[in-house]
Image (spheres, grey):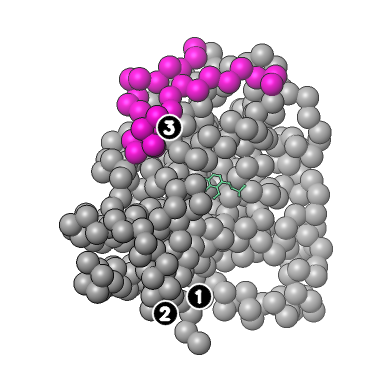
Amino acid sequence: MARAYNFSPGPAALPESVLRQAQSDMLEWGDAGASIVEISHRGPEFMQIAAQTEADLRTLLAVPDDYAVLFVPGGATTQQALIALNFASEGDAVDYVVSGHWGKTALKQLTPAVRLNIAASGEADGYHTIPARDSWQLTPGAAYVHITANETIHGVEFRPAWGNPAPDVGDVPLFADFSSSIASEPLDISRYALIYAGAQKNLGPVGISVVIVRRDLLERAGQPRAHMFNYKAQLENDSMLNTPPTWNWYLLGLTVKWMLGEGGTDEFDRRSDVKSMLLYSTIDGSGGFYRNDVDASVRSRMNVPFFLADEALNDAFLSGAREAGLIGLKGHRVLGGMRASIYNAMPVEGVQALVGYMQEFQKRHG
Ligand code: PMP
Protein backbone atom coordinates (compact mmCIF):
# COMPACT_ATOMS: atom_id res chain seq x y z
CA MET A 1 0.00 0.00 0.00
CA ALA A 2 1.30 3.49 -0.87
CA ARG A 3 2.01 5.80 2.02
CA ALA A 4 -0.60 8.54 2.39
CA TYR A 5 0.19 12.25 2.51
CA ASN A 6 0.18 12.79 6.24
CA PHE A 7 -0.93 16.22 7.51
CA SER A 8 -0.72 15.20 11.15
CA PRO A 9 0.33 18.00 13.56
CA GLY A 10 2.77 15.88 15.55
CA PRO A 11 3.90 13.21 15.77
CA ALA A 12 4.14 14.16 12.14
CA ALA A 13 5.31 12.78 8.82
CA LEU A 14 8.98 11.92 8.49
CA PRO A 15 10.80 11.82 5.16
CA GLU A 16 10.44 8.39 3.60
CA SER A 17 14.19 8.11 3.06
CA VAL A 18 14.72 8.63 6.81
CA LEU A 19 12.27 5.86 7.63
CA ARG A 20 13.91 3.51 5.14
CA GLN A 21 17.36 4.25 6.55
CA ALA A 22 16.07 3.65 10.08
CA GLN A 23 14.47 0.41 8.95
CA SER A 24 17.72 -0.89 7.58
CA ASP A 25 19.69 0.24 10.64
CA MET A 26 17.18 -1.28 13.04
CA LEU A 27 18.66 -4.74 12.98
CA GLU A 28 22.30 -3.81 13.09
CA TRP A 29 24.07 -0.47 13.24
CA GLY A 30 27.17 -0.55 11.06
CA ASP A 31 29.35 -3.33 12.44
CA ALA A 32 28.28 -2.77 16.04
CA GLY A 33 26.83 -6.27 16.12
CA ALA A 34 23.55 -4.87 17.48
CA SER A 35 21.00 -2.18 16.71
CA ILE A 36 21.23 1.39 18.02
CA VAL A 37 18.55 0.71 20.61
CA GLU A 38 20.68 -2.09 22.05
CA ILE A 39 24.06 -0.40 22.50
CA SER A 40 25.41 1.87 25.23
CA HIS A 41 24.80 5.58 24.87
CA ARG A 42 28.34 6.11 26.15
CA GLY A 43 29.92 3.70 23.69
CA PRO A 44 31.88 4.99 20.68
CA GLU A 45 29.14 4.23 18.16
CA PHE A 46 26.43 6.28 19.84
CA MET A 47 28.80 9.05 20.99
CA GLN A 48 29.70 9.48 17.33
CA ILE A 49 26.01 9.74 16.36
CA ALA A 50 25.44 12.32 19.10
CA ALA A 51 28.44 14.43 18.07
CA GLN A 52 27.48 14.31 14.39
CA THR A 53 23.88 15.24 15.17
CA GLU A 54 24.96 18.28 17.12
CA ALA A 55 27.41 19.34 14.40
CA ASP A 56 24.73 18.94 11.71
CA LEU A 57 22.09 20.81 13.70
CA ARG A 58 24.56 23.64 14.33
CA THR A 59 25.18 23.84 10.59
CA LEU A 60 21.49 23.64 9.67
CA LEU A 61 20.45 26.39 12.09
CA ALA A 62 23.70 28.42 12.00
CA VAL A 63 24.01 28.20 15.77
CA PRO A 64 26.68 30.62 17.05
CA ASP A 65 29.50 29.18 19.20
CA ASP A 66 28.37 31.04 22.30
CA TYR A 67 25.18 28.96 22.31
CA ALA A 68 24.96 25.48 23.80
CA VAL A 69 22.81 22.81 22.17
CA LEU A 70 21.09 20.29 24.44
CA PHE A 71 19.23 17.14 23.44
CA VAL A 72 16.94 16.40 26.33
CA PRO A 73 14.30 13.77 27.04
CA GLY A 74 10.66 14.77 27.00
CA GLY A 75 8.60 17.20 25.00
CA ALA A 76 8.18 20.94 24.79
CA THR A 77 5.95 21.05 27.87
CA THR A 78 8.82 19.70 29.95
CA GLN A 79 11.02 22.52 28.68
CA GLN A 80 8.30 25.03 29.54
CA ALA A 81 8.65 23.87 33.14
CA LEU A 82 12.44 23.71 33.07
CA ILE A 83 13.13 27.14 31.56
CA ALA A 84 11.45 28.86 34.48
CA LEU A 85 13.22 26.63 37.03
CA ASN A 86 16.60 27.24 35.42
CA PHE A 87 16.46 30.90 34.50
CA ALA A 88 14.08 32.68 36.90
CA SER A 89 14.87 33.01 40.59
CA GLU A 90 12.33 33.27 43.37
CA GLY A 91 10.50 36.57 43.11
CA ASP A 92 11.63 37.27 39.55
CA ALA A 93 9.12 38.57 37.03
CA VAL A 94 8.65 36.51 33.87
CA ASP A 95 6.89 38.02 30.85
CA TYR A 96 4.74 35.86 28.59
CA VAL A 97 3.19 36.83 25.28
CA VAL A 98 0.28 34.50 24.61
CA SER A 99 -0.59 34.11 20.94
CA GLY A 100 -2.42 30.79 21.12
CA HIS A 101 -3.09 27.58 22.98
CA TRP A 102 0.53 26.57 23.56
CA GLY A 103 1.60 29.94 24.88
CA LYS A 104 -1.23 29.64 27.37
CA THR A 105 -0.28 26.09 28.30
CA ALA A 106 3.23 27.32 29.09
CA LEU A 107 1.83 29.42 31.94
CA LYS A 108 0.66 26.28 33.73
CA GLN A 109 4.25 25.12 34.06
CA LEU A 110 5.32 28.06 36.24
CA THR A 111 5.82 27.69 39.97
CA PRO A 112 4.27 30.23 42.37
CA ALA A 113 7.81 31.39 43.17
CA VAL A 114 7.94 33.57 40.06
CA ARG A 115 5.80 36.58 39.26
CA LEU A 116 3.92 35.89 36.05
CA ASN A 117 3.14 38.86 33.85
CA ILE A 118 1.06 38.23 30.76
CA ALA A 119 2.58 40.99 28.67
CA ALA A 120 0.09 40.53 25.85
CA SER A 121 -2.55 38.03 24.83
CA GLY A 122 -4.54 37.41 21.68
CA GLU A 123 -7.14 35.36 23.54
CA ALA A 124 -9.86 38.04 23.56
CA ASP A 125 -10.00 38.06 19.75
CA GLY A 126 -9.79 34.27 19.44
CA TYR A 127 -6.05 34.38 18.65
CA HIS A 128 -6.64 35.69 15.15
CA THR A 129 -3.87 38.26 15.49
CA ILE A 130 -0.76 38.80 17.58
CA PRO A 131 -1.15 41.94 19.70
CA ALA A 132 0.93 44.79 18.26
CA ARG A 133 4.36 45.09 19.80
CA ASP A 134 3.68 48.59 21.16
CA SER A 135 0.79 47.21 23.22
CA TRP A 136 2.98 44.73 25.12
CA GLN A 137 3.32 45.48 28.82
CA LEU A 138 6.84 44.26 29.46
CA THR A 139 8.35 44.27 32.95
CA PRO A 140 11.67 46.10 33.21
CA GLY A 141 14.24 43.65 34.58
CA ALA A 142 12.15 40.54 33.88
CA ALA A 143 14.06 37.24 33.91
CA TYR A 144 12.93 36.65 30.31
CA VAL A 145 10.20 37.25 27.75
CA HIS A 146 8.57 34.10 26.36
CA ILE A 147 6.88 33.85 22.98
CA THR A 148 5.54 30.96 20.90
CA ALA A 149 7.08 31.39 17.46
CA ASN A 150 4.35 29.31 15.83
CA GLU A 151 1.07 28.34 17.42
CA THR A 152 0.39 24.82 16.17
CA ILE A 153 -3.34 24.78 16.91
CA HIS A 154 -4.37 28.34 16.15
CA GLY A 155 -2.11 28.64 13.10
CA VAL A 156 -0.59 31.93 14.19
CA GLU A 157 3.08 32.64 13.57
CA PHE A 158 5.49 35.50 14.14
CA ARG A 159 6.25 36.40 10.54
CA PRO A 160 9.08 38.60 9.23
CA ALA A 161 7.16 41.82 9.82
CA TRP A 162 8.11 41.18 13.45
CA GLY A 163 11.86 40.94 12.85
CA ASN A 164 13.58 37.71 11.88
CA PRO A 165 10.92 36.75 13.07
CA ALA A 166 11.89 37.87 16.58
CA PRO A 167 10.21 40.86 18.16
CA ASP A 168 12.48 43.45 19.72
CA VAL A 169 12.33 43.15 23.52
CA GLY A 170 15.37 45.24 24.38
CA ASP A 171 17.87 43.82 26.85
CA VAL A 172 15.57 41.21 28.39
CA PRO A 173 16.43 37.70 27.13
CA LEU A 174 13.93 36.46 24.55
CA PHE A 175 12.86 32.82 24.90
CA ALA A 176 10.91 31.17 22.10
CA ASP A 177 9.02 27.93 21.69
CA PHE A 178 9.90 26.85 18.16
CA SER A 179 8.41 23.38 18.42
CA SER A 180 6.37 23.61 15.24
CA SER A 181 8.46 25.90 13.05
CA ILE A 182 12.13 25.26 13.78
CA ALA A 183 14.22 24.89 10.61
CA SER A 184 11.42 26.17 8.37
CA GLU A 185 13.41 29.30 7.53
CA PRO A 186 16.81 30.84 8.25
CA LEU A 187 16.88 32.29 11.74
CA ASP A 188 19.14 34.83 13.40
CA ILE A 189 19.66 32.83 16.59
CA SER A 190 21.53 35.71 18.21
CA ARG A 191 18.23 37.58 18.57
CA TYR A 192 17.06 34.93 21.02
CA ALA A 193 18.57 33.94 24.34
CA LEU A 194 16.91 30.54 24.24
CA ILE A 195 15.03 28.46 21.70
CA TYR A 196 13.40 25.13 22.42
CA ALA A 197 11.53 22.64 20.32
CA GLY A 198 9.94 19.27 20.84
CA ALA A 199 11.25 17.20 17.96
CA GLN A 200 8.05 15.60 16.71
CA LYS A 201 7.21 18.10 13.97
CA ASN A 202 10.16 19.35 11.98
CA LEU A 203 13.03 17.54 13.69
CA GLY A 204 12.02 13.92 13.83
CA PRO A 205 10.37 11.69 16.41
CA VAL A 206 8.59 12.43 19.66
CA GLY A 207 10.41 11.83 22.95
CA ILE A 208 13.29 14.26 22.64
CA SER A 209 13.62 18.04 22.58
CA VAL A 210 16.29 20.43 21.45
CA VAL A 211 17.26 23.42 23.60
CA ILE A 212 19.57 26.07 22.18
CA VAL A 213 20.69 28.46 24.87
CA ARG A 214 23.19 31.29 25.16
CA ARG A 215 25.89 29.90 27.41
CA ASP A 216 26.02 32.84 29.83
CA LEU A 217 22.43 32.13 30.87
CA LEU A 218 23.48 28.76 32.24
CA GLU A 219 25.26 30.61 35.06
CA ARG A 220 21.93 31.80 36.45
CA ALA A 221 20.95 30.27 39.79
CA GLY A 222 17.30 29.71 38.95
CA GLN A 223 15.00 28.08 41.49
CA PRO A 224 15.75 25.14 43.79
CA ARG A 225 15.43 22.01 41.64
CA ALA A 226 16.60 18.47 41.26
CA HIS A 227 19.90 17.85 39.55
CA MET A 228 18.09 16.09 36.70
CA PHE A 229 16.25 19.34 35.93
CA ASN A 230 19.46 21.37 35.65
CA TYR A 231 20.29 22.39 32.08
CA LYS A 232 23.88 23.26 33.02
CA ALA A 233 24.39 19.78 34.41
CA GLN A 234 22.95 18.36 31.18
CA LEU A 235 25.48 20.35 29.19
CA GLU A 236 28.34 19.20 31.38
CA ASN A 237 27.23 15.61 30.85
CA ASP A 238 26.79 15.72 27.06
CA SER A 239 22.98 15.72 27.51
CA MET A 240 23.40 12.32 29.14
CA LEU A 241 22.52 12.95 32.78
CA ASN A 242 20.52 9.78 32.48
CA THR A 243 20.16 7.21 29.71
CA PRO A 244 18.98 9.36 26.82
CA PRO A 245 16.35 8.34 24.26
CA THR A 246 18.98 7.04 21.88
CA TRP A 247 16.68 5.87 19.09
CA ASN A 248 14.88 9.22 18.98
CA TRP A 249 18.20 11.07 19.01
CA TYR A 250 19.45 8.96 16.12
CA LEU A 251 16.23 9.55 14.11
CA LEU A 252 16.55 13.26 14.81
CA GLY A 253 20.08 13.09 13.43
CA LEU A 254 18.88 11.39 10.25
CA THR A 255 16.17 14.01 9.79
CA VAL A 256 18.61 16.89 10.24
CA LYS A 257 20.96 15.30 7.71
CA TRP A 258 18.06 14.97 5.28
CA MET A 259 17.22 18.67 5.68
CA LEU A 260 20.83 19.63 4.97
CA GLY A 261 20.82 17.42 1.90
CA GLU A 262 17.62 19.04 0.61
CA GLY A 263 19.19 22.50 0.71
CA GLY A 264 18.80 23.58 4.33
CA THR A 265 16.60 26.29 5.77
CA ASP A 266 16.73 28.50 2.65
CA GLU A 267 15.11 25.72 0.67
CA PHE A 268 12.49 24.95 3.34
CA ASP A 269 11.71 28.65 3.55
CA ARG A 270 11.02 28.63 -0.20
CA ARG A 271 8.95 25.45 -0.07
CA SER A 272 6.99 26.70 2.95
CA ASP A 273 6.01 29.80 0.99
CA VAL A 274 4.88 27.72 -1.97
CA LYS A 275 2.96 25.20 0.13
CA SER A 276 1.24 27.67 2.45
CA MET A 277 0.32 30.04 -0.39
CA LEU A 278 -1.28 27.17 -2.30
CA LEU A 279 -3.43 26.31 0.68
CA TYR A 280 -4.38 29.81 1.75
CA SER A 281 -5.23 30.87 -1.79
CA THR A 282 -7.45 27.81 -2.18
CA ILE A 283 -9.23 28.63 1.09
CA ASP A 284 -9.55 32.35 0.34
CA GLY A 285 -10.63 31.67 -3.22
CA SER A 286 -13.39 29.25 -2.24
CA GLY A 287 -16.05 31.94 -1.93
CA GLY A 288 -16.58 31.09 1.72
CA PHE A 289 -16.91 27.32 1.31
CA TYR A 290 -13.65 27.08 3.30
CA ARG A 291 -12.52 29.67 5.81
CA ASN A 292 -9.38 30.59 7.76
CA ASP A 293 -9.85 33.38 10.29
CA VAL A 294 -6.25 34.34 11.02
CA ASP A 295 -4.98 37.80 10.11
CA ALA A 296 -3.00 37.43 6.88
CA SER A 297 0.13 39.03 8.37
CA VAL A 298 0.53 36.28 10.99
CA ARG A 299 -0.84 33.24 9.22
CA SER A 300 1.28 30.20 9.95
CA ARG A 301 3.19 28.54 7.14
CA MET A 302 3.31 25.28 9.10
CA ASN A 303 -0.22 24.73 10.41
CA VAL A 304 -3.24 25.84 8.44
CA PRO A 305 -6.51 25.54 10.36
CA PHE A 306 -9.62 25.86 8.22
CA PHE A 307 -13.35 25.40 8.56
CA LEU A 308 -16.07 24.29 6.21
CA ALA A 309 -18.96 26.76 6.13
CA ASP A 310 -21.25 23.77 6.49
CA GLU A 311 -19.82 21.85 9.45
CA ALA A 312 -22.25 19.01 8.75
CA LEU A 313 -19.90 18.11 5.89
CA ASN A 314 -16.89 17.62 8.17
CA ASP A 315 -17.13 13.83 8.37
CA ALA A 316 -17.65 13.49 4.62
CA PHE A 317 -14.64 15.75 4.02
CA LEU A 318 -12.42 13.67 6.27
CA SER A 319 -13.50 10.29 4.99
CA GLY A 320 -13.19 11.41 1.37
CA ALA A 321 -9.72 12.76 2.14
CA ARG A 322 -8.68 9.44 3.58
CA GLU A 323 -9.89 7.65 0.46
CA ALA A 324 -7.83 10.11 -1.58
CA GLY A 325 -4.72 9.24 0.46
CA LEU A 326 -4.75 12.38 2.63
CA ILE A 327 -4.68 11.76 6.38
CA GLY A 328 -4.28 13.70 9.63
CA LEU A 329 -6.57 16.59 8.67
CA LYS A 330 -8.97 16.63 11.62
CA GLY A 331 -8.65 19.87 13.57
CA HIS A 332 -7.57 19.98 17.22
CA ARG A 333 -10.44 19.50 19.66
CA VAL A 334 -9.86 23.03 21.03
CA LEU A 335 -10.78 24.56 17.67
CA GLY A 336 -12.64 21.89 15.71
CA GLY A 337 -12.77 22.05 11.92
CA MET A 338 -9.75 20.99 9.91
CA ARG A 339 -6.04 21.59 10.08
CA ALA A 340 -3.35 20.81 7.56
CA SER A 341 0.13 20.65 9.07
CA ILE A 342 2.67 21.11 6.33
CA TYR A 343 6.05 20.71 7.94
CA ASN A 344 9.34 20.30 6.12
CA ALA A 345 8.76 16.62 5.37
CA MET A 346 5.53 17.39 3.48
CA PRO A 347 6.36 17.67 -0.22
CA VAL A 348 4.77 20.33 -2.42
CA GLU A 349 2.99 17.49 -4.26
CA GLY A 350 1.22 16.56 -1.03
CA VAL A 351 -0.25 20.05 -0.75
CA GLN A 352 -1.14 20.03 -4.45
CA ALA A 353 -3.01 16.78 -3.85
CA LEU A 354 -4.81 18.33 -0.87
CA VAL A 355 -5.93 21.48 -2.70
CA GLY A 356 -7.03 19.33 -5.64
CA TYR A 357 -9.16 17.29 -3.27
CA MET A 358 -10.55 20.43 -1.59
CA GLN A 359 -11.61 21.91 -4.93
CA GLU A 360 -13.20 18.69 -6.06
CA PHE A 361 -15.03 18.31 -2.73
CA GLN A 362 -16.34 21.85 -3.09
CA LYS A 363 -17.60 21.11 -6.61
CA ARG A 364 -19.49 18.11 -5.32
CA HIS A 365 -20.94 19.79 -2.24
CA GLY A 366 -20.79 23.55 -2.90
N1 PMP B 1 4.45 23.99 22.09
C1 PMP B 1 4.01 23.85 20.84
C2 PMP B 1 4.16 25.01 19.90
C3 PMP B 1 3.43 22.65 20.42
O1 PMP B 1 2.98 22.52 19.17
C4 PMP B 1 3.31 21.57 21.34
C5 PMP B 1 2.72 20.24 20.96
N2 PMP B 1 1.98 20.14 19.85
C6 PMP B 1 3.76 21.78 22.64
C7 PMP B 1 4.34 22.98 22.98
C8 PMP B 1 3.67 20.66 23.65
O2 PMP B 1 4.63 19.72 23.28
P1 PMP B 1 4.78 18.30 23.97
O3 PMP B 1 3.53 17.56 23.72
O4 PMP B 1 5.97 17.75 23.23
O5 PMP B 1 5.06 18.52 25.40
Q: Residue 16 placed where, x, y %? A: 50, 75
The answer to whether any part of residue 267 appears in the image is no
Which SS class for mark 2? helix
- The residue to which callout 1 is attached is 16
- The residue to which callout 2 is attached is 323
- The residue to which callout 3 is attached is 123
Q: Mark 3: which amino acid? A: Glu
In the depicted structure, whether residue 248 falls above or below residue 79: below
- Are discs 2 and 3 less than 8 Å apart at CB? no
Viewer-nearest of labels 3 and 1? Answer: 3
Q: Earlier in the sequence, mark 1 or mark 2?
A: 1
Q: Residues within 10 Å of mark 1 (few under 14, many from 20)?
A: few
Which SS class for mark 3? helix
Q: Residue at x 64, y 45 (%)?
A: 70
Q: Residues within 10 Å of mark 3 (few under 14, many from 20)?
A: some
Distance, label 3 to label 1, CA atoms, is: 38 Å
Q: Residue at x 65, y 28 (%)?
A: 110
Q: Mark 2: which amino acid? A: Glu
Q: Mark 1: which amino acid? A: Glu
On residue 139, which mark appears?
none
Q: Earlier in the sequence, mark 3 or mark 1?
A: 1
Q: Is-magenta flag for residue 15?
A: no
Q: Residue 175 placed where, x, y %? A: 52, 32
Distance, label 1 to label 2, CA atoms, is: 21 Å
Residue 197 vs residue 117, the one in the foreground: 117
